[in-house]
Amino acid sequence: MAYRVTVRDAEPTRLPGAGLPWDKSVKIADCNSPAHWTDGKLVVFSSASHPWRAEGPDLFHLGEPTPVEWDREANGGRWIEATFKHPNETLYGWYHNEPLLDVFSVQNSGKDHKLTAPNIGSCRSFDDGRTWEDMGAILTVSDDSYFPETRNYYFGGGNGDFSVIVEGDYAYLPMGLYNRKVEEQGVGWARLPIDRLDDPVGAAEKWFEGGWSQPGLKGRATPTWPAKGDWHSVAPDVYWGPSIHWNRHLNCYVILLNRAIGTRWEPGGIYVSFGDSLADPASWTEPEPILEGGSWYPVAYGLENGDTDKSAGEVARLYLGVESRHELVFG
């Protein structure tokens, strides 16, 4: 594959965002912000511990966001990072959850920020994303993968910071791997059968050592893009936060990646990788830099009718969180 991406300046714009838990007047996007179309309206979710929903005629004319409702409380915050509108009109979603875990209780004592290890869960909505049913965690890690002594400010293990795209019989999830073992850190993959969307717990499987051979719950995962510097050291160098879309101009899949180079995930640039096969995570290209520095959560939104964060053509809008100051030109 010989693809390329050109980044060019564009008129600044922003997503409506989600209110901060401690100041709802401040709107951010602390995750990937998935989108879908319903009855001629674009619906976008952004999260900051809790998801907010906005809709409008297009990406640049979204209305005021409102917080969604959950059917039950959770241990820790939930960030909806991916959605899939089924032909039967059910809206399926996947969330990043950051639970408070006993294994970190000593390390969290007296700290201004609570160390956690995220997991990934499934949810669904029958009213276009205004209220959600939490169906439970589908991707977790084994207890021996936690690292309470980590130098990382946020995570001492877990799976999270992901996106989802559906092809054929599966929903594929590229995700961040935060294992205590450096050889199992980076960006890896899981998949969930489409026929288990309504019964997802126990159905997901992780890519490990060349096959879909590990269970989603407490299974191991092999990174497609492994860490170059240990997540849990004072000098990490790791890709994370993959955002995937199908690019019809290139006729392939595209993933945008963050790169963390500090214990508080200081940004080391935005990167891109290309792939022809979701079934074979080993087939993707080595990430290439497209933007120096940058910020968190790069997402490409297509600009043609019907496009979302999951589809784009020759030109897409690049968002970093809620902010967009660039376009991506694929060639």
Image (cartoon, helix red, strand yellow):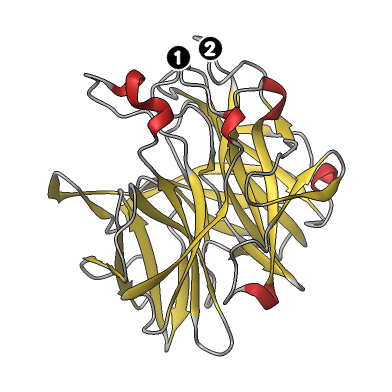
Residue shown at 42%/89% (left/top)? 39
29 to the left or right of 103: left
To which residue does mark 1 refer?
A: 151
Report crowding for label 1: few under 14, some 14 to 19, many 20 or more residues within 10 A (C-alpha): some
Give the camera-side residue of 101 and 273: 101
Whether residues under marks 2 and 1 lie with C-beta atoms below 8 angstroms apart, the answer is yes
Q: Position of residue 159 (x, y in %)?
A: 56, 41
SS for callout 2: loop
Q: State which tag comes first along the sequence, 2 or 1.
A: 1
Pick whichever, 112 or 52, lies toward us.
112
Going by the numbered disc 2, the residue's amino acid type is Ser
Q: Is residue 19 above or below residue 62?
A: above
Q: Residue at x 37, y 75 (%)?
A: 129
Closer to us: 138 or 132: 138
Q: Is residue 211 above or below residue 135?
A: above
For the point 47% across and 15% down, the residue is 149
Where's residue 117, x and y in %? Answer: 47, 35
Question: Would you name the residue on which mark 2 appears?
Answer: 233
Separation of residues labelled 2 and 1 (CA atoms):
6 Å
Mark drawn on residue 264: none
Q: Position of residue 157 (x, y in %)?
A: 53, 31
The tally of labels here is 2
Q: Does 283 appear above or below 203?
A: above
Label 1 residue SS: loop
The answer to whether residue 291 of the structure is visible from this angle is no
Above or below, 159 relative to 86 = above
> For this rendering, which residue is in front, 294 or 70?
70
Of all residues shown, which one is farthest toward the top? 234
Three-letter code for the amino acid on which mark 1 is drawn: Arg
Instruction: Give how far across and how far down residue 292 sits, in percent.
Output: 52, 27
Can see residue 3? yes
